[in-house]
């Protein structure tokens, strides 16, 4: 069943990508917070 195979591959890709996405979102949040502090 290729659909289940593709689903497991997608889950593996998401599990490997999600931590980096969390780091990127945290970095963007910090930069936005710093910009708000610099320009009140």
Image (cartoon, rainbow, N blue to C red):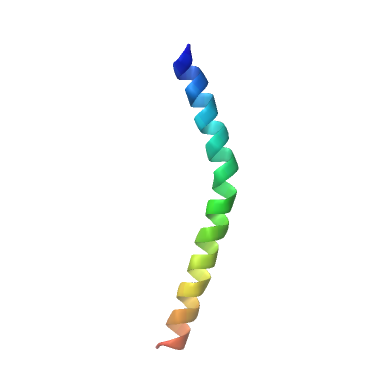
Q: Quadrant of the C terminus?
A: bottom left
Q: Quadrant of residue 8?
A: top right
Q: Extreme top residue here?
A: 1
| Residue shown at 47% from the left, 15% from the top | 2
- Residue 12: percent from the left, percent from the top? 57, 33
Foreground residue among 33 and 2: 2
Q: Quadrant of residue 36?
A: bottom left
| Residue shown at 52% from the left, 71% from the top | 30
| Residue shown at 54% from the left, 36% from the top | 13
Above or below residue 7? Residue 14 is: below
Foreground residue among 11 and 40: 11
Above or below residue 16? Residue 30 is: below
- Residue 5: percent from the left, percent from the top? 52, 19
Q: Extreme left residue here?
A: 40
Above or below residue 23? Residue 31 is: below
- Residue 25: percent from the left, percent from the top? 50, 60
- Residue 9: percent from the left, percent from the top? 54, 28
| Residue shown at 55% from the left, 46% from the top | 18
Above or below residue 38? Residue 23 is: above
Foreground residue among 37 and 16: 16
Q: How many marks?
A: 0
């Amino acid at each position: 069943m290729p659909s289940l195979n593709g689903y497991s591959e997608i889950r593996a890709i998401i599990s490997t990508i999600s931590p980096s996405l969390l780091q990127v979102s945290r970095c963007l949040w910090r930069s936005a917070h710093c910009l708000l502090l610099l320009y009140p």
